[in-house]
Image: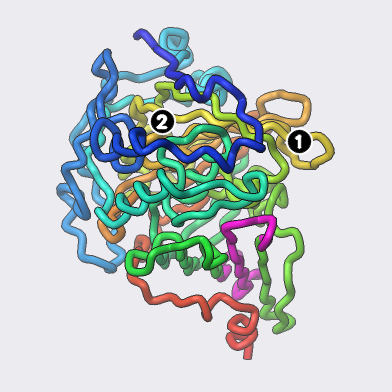
Amino acid sequence: MKITTLFVAAVAVNIGLQGHALAQVSPEEAAKLGKELTCVGAEKAGNAEGTIPPYTGKYLGEVPGWNHVKFSGDQPVDPYADEKPILVITAQNMSQYESHLTEGQKALLKRYPTSYKMNIYPGHRDFRYPDYACERVKSNALNAKLVDDGMGIEGLGQVPFPIPKNGMELLWNHQLPIRAYTEDKVSDLASVLPNGSIGWGRAHGRNLSQANSPKVEPKTEGGLQAMSWNTTLKPVRDNGVVSISHEPYNFLVNPRQAWSYSPSTRRVRQLPGYGYDQPMIGTNGTMTVDEDRLYNGSPERYSWKMLGKREIYVPANAYKANAGNVKYADLLTPNHPNPSYMRYELRRVWVLEATLKEGYRHVYGKRVLFIDEDTWNAVLSDNYDSRGALWKHAMINYYYHPDMSAWQAGSQFFMDLNSGQYTGYGMTNEAKKGPILNEGKFTPDMYTADAARAMGR
């Protein structure tokens, strides 16, 4: 299969931070949104080979075959359940398709030649975003800008740069995609050792993203893009521990803040420097705090470079991996999740490379994110150690959810290519309910240190 790496002329130059604030597009470029480009900036046309389909956007707020009751928390139903793989990539035939694979995918195929494979399915680009979100993105194309050397943005909080000109703009699109305004879900964490034994965690998350409010225009002057409240349910020894965090639009002016409540002491304490490469609790070091959604938080420790677009096999329309009838005993096989539940499609993705700055510290010396052009969500990442050796590969199984008419981050998997262990994160397959999105029942006063203290009292 022929592969063409797609580079845009504007991204061939590594634009310095000094030019970031001047990167708004021309009215002529912005006029392409909703025409030859989708309303969020993806190419509507398929590829020349016909292996990537054209965008249809024929479904809004519905998924065929999923008779969803709004805010019910029912588990997702796969609209493509009857489809069979059109291709299966294995260690034996991967050389024919390696131009469509990331370095991490190739490493997994080589390391686990008898158990790991990639099932490739027909591509579908059938779901669209609400009109109000599209209007905000078009406004951003003409008005949004980076400030403080890319540490912050000014504009509206949904896809600020639909026609990105540099790596920092691309990063902010990933930081601020169109997603849930409120999210209420119980999710599971599994730390899977090479021998198949599993350490378990469970948390109840109540998240509020002002950047995605369907009713109030999310202007960055508000200061905070999102707030989270997570209550630990498992393991039992940590039951009742609460963590709260505030995510800003500008990490220089208003750094991320976080607090923790301990039921044993009934005290709330602030967590200084929360994020970055602090290990995510319960993951045996296979996942850092800033790896949720593959990257989150301040961009300050890395230099960000946009490497253009590539056609890559990525997780897409991943209903099967998040279905309520899938048991963890079947999904969580040793060394990597069960390939039978993964769905890959050939898609155009933006490639974003992060290189650790001199004088800064992080366990990852380099990170490469692969960002779906249709959603601005990073779906794959390859992470390298300080010596430049490939260390970890991670993936997220997104699916379109009717509650919000946008893409929900489902199960995330973080695989250590050295030790053979991995973490399954954000899984809801065996929860009593799936996520409840955009119900709008959370308010900012629920995400304060005082609110956590009140819960203790």
Q: How many marks overall?
A: 2
Quarter of the rendering containing residue 44:
top left
Amino acid on which disc 2 is placed: Val
Task: From the viewer's perspective, tell me whether residue 449 is left or right of residue 104.
Answer: right
Q: Position of residue 347 (x, y in %)?
A: 36, 27
Distance from disc 1 to disc 2, alpha carbons, whole Å, reads 29 Å
Q: Position of residue 422 (x, y in %)?
A: 59, 40
Report the residue at 38% width, 44% height from top: 398
Q: Residues within 10 Å of mark 2 (few under 14, many from 20)?
A: many
Q: Quadrant of the N terminus?
A: top left
In the image, residue 83 above or below residue 406: above
* Disc sitting over residue 191 in the figure: none
SS under mark 2: strand
Report the residue at 53% width, 54% height from top: 154
Task: From the viewer's perspective, tell me whether residue 276 is left or right of residue 377.
Answer: right
Kindly identify which residue carries mark 1.
Answer: 357
Residue placed furthest toward the right: 359
In the image, residue 97 above or below residue 13: above
Q: Is residue 19 part of the magenta span, yes or no? A: no
Q: Is residue 233 part of the magenta span, yes or no? A: yes
In the image, residue 407 above or below residue 170: below
Instruction: Please give the range of residues in magenta.
Output: 231-255
Kindly identify which residue carries mark 2.
Answer: 314
Amino acid on which disc 1 is placed: Lys
In the image, residue 390 above or below residue 454: above
Task: From the viewer's perspective, tell me whether residue 199 is left or right of residue 115.
Answer: right
Q: Residue 369: in sight, yes or no? A: yes
Residue placed furthest toward the bottom: 457
Quarter of the rendering containing residue 319:
top left
Sequence-wise, which precedes: disc 1 or disc 2?
2
